[in-house]
Image: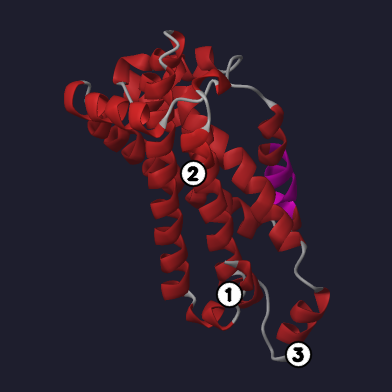
Amino acid sequence: MIWIALPNAAGIPSPTSIFQAWNKLALEQGLLLELFRSVVVIWEALILSALISFGVAYLTTADLFKPVGTFIASMRFLGFAGLTFLFTLWTSNGQNLKLALLTFGMTVFLTRSTVDEVKGIPLESIDYARSLGLRGWRITYEIVIRGRLHTMLDLLRQNAAIGWTLVVFVEGLVRSDGGIGAMLLIQGKYFNLSAVFAIQLTILAYGIIQDMMLNAIRFAVCPYTRLNRSDS
């Protein structure tokens, strides 16, 4: 109601103008198709980043691999601008370049979180596993992989949200393959605020649905988390 009552001078388009802009973008400029393209690349990057980050985090239970986890996590301070040239050389087309950049951005942040989660496992839990006769990688499987799976999936859920922040920048760099991020930047370039808000609200709506889906997957894989919903 406050939004509807705001004067146009506030700089925020009215809900009516946003709806009209969304309708035009969807019918004439392929908004939903561009959203689908972005969704596909984000899920691909999410799966790849999960495989890399989870694997590195689990391996850091061995001292030999701890520097690897630290090195990958430290690369989160690097910006895309200085790496785009290298990734362009390493990839064959715009789609692969976009996927590589997005996977890199999501992996370095997820690795930091997963490595910290593994570090935070109480020593008492490891000692208890040893008292049960578990040794070596069996302890890693029972305590780290199985015991922290619900937390790892929650970190993955958070990383998926970060992906939508990164995808706008990545698709702005690689506009040849389209995507909703490229569309957003084009509309922003021409100060079409109604269209910008329409695209942003579309991303927000899908992001909420995606978050609910990932949370449902976490509950399905780790049903014991339903006993405590305070972290969901």
Point out the stretch of residues depicted in magenta: 64-71
**Residue 40 pos. (x, y %):** 32, 40
Residue 88: quadrant of the picture: top left
The quarter of the image holding the C terminus is bottom right
Q: CA distance from mark 2 to mark 1?
A: 31 Å
Q: Is residue 179 magenta?
A: no
Q: Amino acid at mark 2?
A: Met
* Tag of residue 150: none
Q: Secondary structure at mark 1?
A: helix
Measured along the vertical axis of the image, is residue 228 above or below residue 16?
below
Near mark 1 (Cα within 10 A), the count class, few <14, some 14-19 or many ≥20, is few
Question: Secondary structure of the magenta portion, mostly?
Answer: helix
**Residue 163 pos. (x, y %):** 50, 39
Q: Does residue 22 show up?
A: yes
Q: CA distance from mark 3 to mark 2?
A: 62 Å
Along the polypeptide, which appears first: circle 2 or circle 1? 2
Residue at x-position 45% and y-position 29% = 100
- In the picture of the structure, the residue carrying the numbered disc 1 is 229
Q: Amino acid at mark 3?
A: Ser
Specify whether 34 is left or right of 119: left
Specify whether 178 is left or right of 225: left
- In the picture of the structure, the residue carrying the numbered disc 3 is 131
- In the picture of the structure, the residue carrying the numbered disc 2 is 1
